Amino acid sequence: MKASVGIIGMGLMGRMYAKRFSAAGYSVNVCDRPARYEELNTEFADKHNVNVLPNGHLVSRISDWIIYSVEAEMIDSVVAEYGPSTKVGAIVGGQTSCKAPELAAFEKHLPSDVEIVTCHSLHGPGVDPKGQPLVIIKHRASQKSADTVEQILSCLESKVIHLTGEEHDRITADTQAVTHVAFLSMGTAWAANNQFPWEIDRYVGGIENAKINITLRIYSNKWHVYAGLAILNPAAKRQIRQYAESVTELYKLMLGGHREELAQRIRQAGAAVFSKDAKSQDLLLGDDLLDKFSLSKGPKEKRPNNHLSILAIVDCWWKLGIVPYSHMICSTPLFRIWLGVTEYLYRNEALLSEVIDTAINDHSFRSDDLEFTFAARAWSDCVSFGSFDAYRDRFENIQRYFAPRLEDAVRMGNEMIKTIMENTKT
């Protein structure tokens, strides 16, 4: 007899899991806030093995594996409320992007006879989970229970990676924290300058398409998807702070016209991150692959860009001693794309020289870079202060600015990710 699955929290990921488990023949018990009870009943009316319940107490007392699919900042209070109702001998896990507070909540609030096996799908709800990284963490459990969870999750057809909670948090910080803040800062800068970048002639070409599409894709999601990882993960805070420092220092070198110092720093960082072994590998992707994924209407001529956002990523990795290739097995689709774009720039000497020339001699992007620098520092401050309210306010303000084009961006982003993932299989 198949184990029954409980899902507490029916956001986009919770609903995706429920539908996948249901299609695989599992009995799935789900709930969300009481106000969403009727809505969920209607949505899952045609799925006879999905049992919508009024609250997490009812889900917890009848399910064999219970998944808390809630915001990271809410995990402690939600587990405190429903954890004591957990069925004797059941297994409990969660779907948060930062495992330290999640596991602490489980240890604090779950009965001692409950086992803990948690997970994290390293992709968004709009991405096909097949072949994507899926982390499974056996924290307080028998191997039999861990095998049960892995068997249930096998219906996702994801690539399973076994880690500890600490390893998970370090790797997700390495692969996601700086990536997210770079795109959050781009969106903030464009909004501050009252720009839709696909409508102006400065942002043309494959690399620019990746910047625009990923930025809009991030702003099409819920704010808490990124806030929990950034604020609750100590490693993420440190990396975001370093990224803001790298942006600021590189921008000052550009403003001061310090060509030799800028070039030396850029190349030193590139040599550290893109080692000889990395340079002997095929490029993850090229500018030409991204050319087709444009939101712009009509052909436009490419213009040189100093790519401050990319230069700062590599500078940050160098300063922190991060080797991005070491975490490819746990990489998200967005990280793969950003690493591919970054690698393409640094392994093309002619393009890198053009970037340095542009940074010193071409002032076309100075106003954008100024706002980008302000934005990176502001996001870093927001994360350092640990304010979810400030994070949400900043995020949703920019989200409203881009709202008219988010639907197109998600569609284009899905196509771009699908194409790139097919070209960057490991």
Image (cartoon, grey):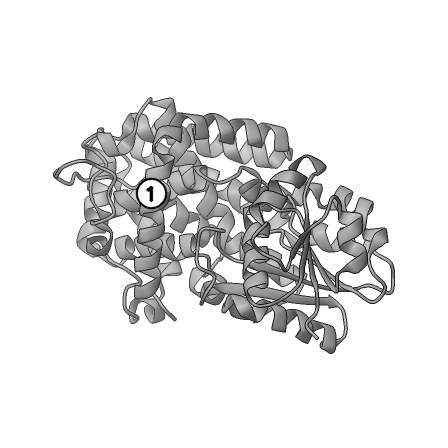
Decide which of 50, 139 is in the foreground and name it.
50
Q: Position of residue 247 (x, y in %)?
A: 41, 38
Horizontal and vertical percent for residue 182? 42, 41
Q: Residue at x 29, y 36 (%)?
A: 258
Residue 23: x, y in percent? 54, 63
In this picture, is 88 found above or below 148? Answer: above
Q: Is residue 21 above or below residue 388?
A: below
| Residue 256 visible in this rendered orientation of the protein | no
Q: Quadrant of residue 309?
A: top left
The kind of secondary structure element at disc 1 is: helix
Instruction: Residue under label 1, please give it.
Output: 213
Q: Is residue 28 above or below residue 181?
A: below
Q: Amino acid at mark 1?
A: Asn
**Residue 322 showing in the rendered view:** yes
Using a 10 Å C-alpha cutoff, classify the residue at mark 1 as few (fewer than 14 neighbours), some (14 to 19) or many (20 or more): many
Task: Please tell me which residue is depicted at 44% across the width and 55% down the height of the picture.
Answer: 127
The residue at 71%/52% (across/down) is: 102
